[in-house]
Amino acid sequence: MSASSAPSWDTVPTAPSHADPDPLVAARHSFFRYRHTDAPGTARHHRPTGDLAMLLEAEYGIGPRAVPPDEEPGLGREDRAVASLRRACRLAVPLTPEALLAHAGGGSRLGAVLTEMWPDTVRRHGARYAEETLRRALLHGAPDAARTAFLLDCAQATDLSPLSAAEAAGLAARTGRTARHALWRYLHQLPDGATLLPALDTASDPYERLLLAPPDTLTEEYWPATGILVAQTMLQGDLDTPGQGPSGGLSVLLGGLGDRLARVDGIAGVVTVVTAGPDDLARDPRLLRQRAPGHWVLRLPVDTPGSPRQHARPGHHPALTWWAVRLLRSLPRRPDVLHVRYADDASLALAHAAARTGARLLFTAAPDPHRTLVGKHADAHDPQRAESLRADLHHVFCADRLVARADTVIGIPGHPGSRDLLRHFPVLADRYGPTGPAAPPEGIAPYVPAADEPSQRQRMLDDLFADGGRPDALAPADRALPLLLCVGRLHPVKQQDLLVRTWLTTGLWRLTTLVVVGGSSGLSTASERQMRDALDSLLAGQDAAARRLAMLSALPNDEVRRLERALADPRDGVPAWYVCPSAKEEFGIAVLEAMEAGLPAAGPLRGGVAHYLRDGVNGILLDTSTASGLARGLHRLASLPEHRRTRLARAGQHTVATRYSVADMAQALAGEYVATVLGPGSASM
């Protein structure tokens, strides 16, 4: 489905909404199925309380019994505007430019829905009319930097010229950084605009220098001329530093996938799109580098240290779109298909860039935060939780827009798979039928041993068991104890604090050692600092237990896999387990890598791990929703006899070897890419 074609919600074959106890699901099924009439069994049969009740009613309420959003008690002006505009966007209501721009300069979530609706408004009402409306708003509205930036970004996104180059340059000279950057982006699109940009030596940092520089061809290296060129996005974290900041399993997955996909017949190459802040650009100014034969990494500059945090991403949407369009057009050849993951504003920005550069769009949809939203916010009343609720509803909207914009939607393999996806995205049943969209397999790249692999493994074990008095090591005398290994970024959803608390309070520290790997070694993110503070508090006064806990900063992926192999080697005498205490995992690449290395693994019941880890057969499933549930699981694995532990490890290793190869994943995705670009029936090329 193209971005310009509006989906019809009238005939979506969904189950009656009253059959589902989740009020979000019921509201969405009622909304998408019944467009003009009040549906029997709508969400009011399952009405929650507090802010969730009001916001669901405002955004999804339908028919004569629904309370109009401007009359809903307890909702603020912006809540009402956001709810009304989201409904109009989902229903493809043709709002005028004046109606949309009346909201310019509002909050970030309001700006996000306006940004999403603006291109269609221009198509429906004409470029000249929209341009005149923008000019009036810019010249006669109240002077406001955020409003000016938004209006200029609207113009730039739809190739409109409401201001002359001289007018824009004059404004840029007397505005703040955000509006100034928007004006510079706007000047780049005008025939004579670049001549009025400030000189490069006036830039305050590497980001501004790139913003002021003329576009250039990004590479003179060999560039494939035939086959499909694929772009994939990794806009959260860094591709090369898994376990640090927001970088997690996705960076490992996409790195190995891009390397392998570039070698599949019919695929010309892969461009993995990442972000780079001013500090990153100061260390390395390159915007394009070759990671492996046929696999390039393209860096989109962002005006923030590191990757933009989730709550700030709506504000980066216009700039990300602009940079993506500019840099993708600067490649010797533009990508044929762009694959986005995550339902957020960064993915929406890249979806807009795909439409402007002629690339087809493929979106990996997941029912997140949909499936946990009501449980988290059913009775939210306090301001902090209410803000989190609004953020989750915003991500639900982003997911809907990505589904509507995507030429192809795919799912994530896992239990309950397509059934769960169709439950939370009722429109997908109309597009893909009762079985839902394809869910290509995921997998891990093969491990490549170092030339001196045995000595490197021995060194890692010697370092790990060097001194129990060190925070990053264990005592040599504890080498015979069962060891629990946990690897991942330090974040509340990963629940390293729950793991350590359970290990301490249940007395498992007397029977086992614990090794936690993750987190930046230098500057830490807020989530990392929060987790480290929580772990320090838990260990305060627990000197004996602290000697049996080793905290290591994030390691490169090859070193993590080498450590896992060293621990799994029976000749070294370390009876180790891999433990994933996350609240949920969409798939759990780190769990698969541990299983592949030969470690018996324990992972969460919730999420995708249960798709491949069968309790008592090739690993152990843990109830990570509570400390008591996790305690039961940890005691269970610690008490298993050695022959059972070994049997689970071998079964897990066999599972990965036979079912989870990155080569199979690349081949399956290549078929989806070919079919998306060339049409159904072409995937076998």
Image (cartoon, grey):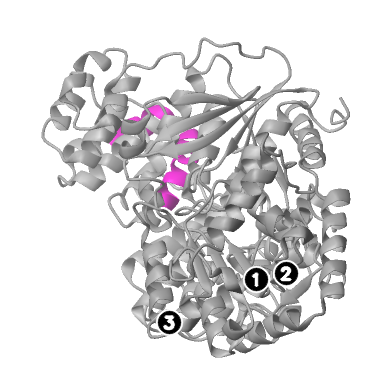
In the image, taking residue 504 as reference, residue 384 lies left or right, namely left
Give the residue at mark 3. Answer: 543
What is the number of the mark on residue 483? 1
Describe the element under mark 1 as helix, strand or loop. strand
Q: Quadrant of residue 676?
A: top right
Residue at figure coordinates x 66%, y 37% from the top left: 452
Q: Is residue 120 magenta?
A: yes
| Residue 28 picture location, percent across and down | 63, 67
Q: Amino acid at mark 1?
A: Leu
- Count all numbered tags in the image, as a single digit: 3
Q: Earlier in the sequence, mark 3 or mark 2?
A: 3
Task: Work out how far the residue at label 3 is from the one at label 2, CA to CA, in angstroms.
Answer: 24 Å
Q: Which residues are magenta?
A: 112-134
Q: Amino acid at mark 2?
A: Pro
In the image, taking residue 654 as reference, residue 347 lies left or right, namely left
Describe the element under mark 2 as helix, strand or loop. loop
| Residue 81 picture location, percent across and down | 39, 62
Q: Is residue 154 above or below residue 237?
A: above
Q: Is residue 529 above or below residue 38?
A: above
Mark 1 touches mark 2? (CB < 8 Å): yes
Residue 46 seen in the figure: yes
Q: Is residue 493 above or below residue 118?
A: below
Q: Is residue 118 magenta?
A: yes
Mark 3 touches mark 2? (CB < 8 Å): no
In the image, taking residue 459 as reference, residue 447 lies left or right, namely right
What is the number of the mark on residue 575? 2
Residue at figure coordinates x 81%, y 39% from the top left: 668
Residue 416 seen in the figure: no
| Residue 679 picture location, percent across and down | 79, 30
Q: Quadrant of the C terminus?
A: top right
Q: Nearer the viewer, residue 315 or 166?
A: 315
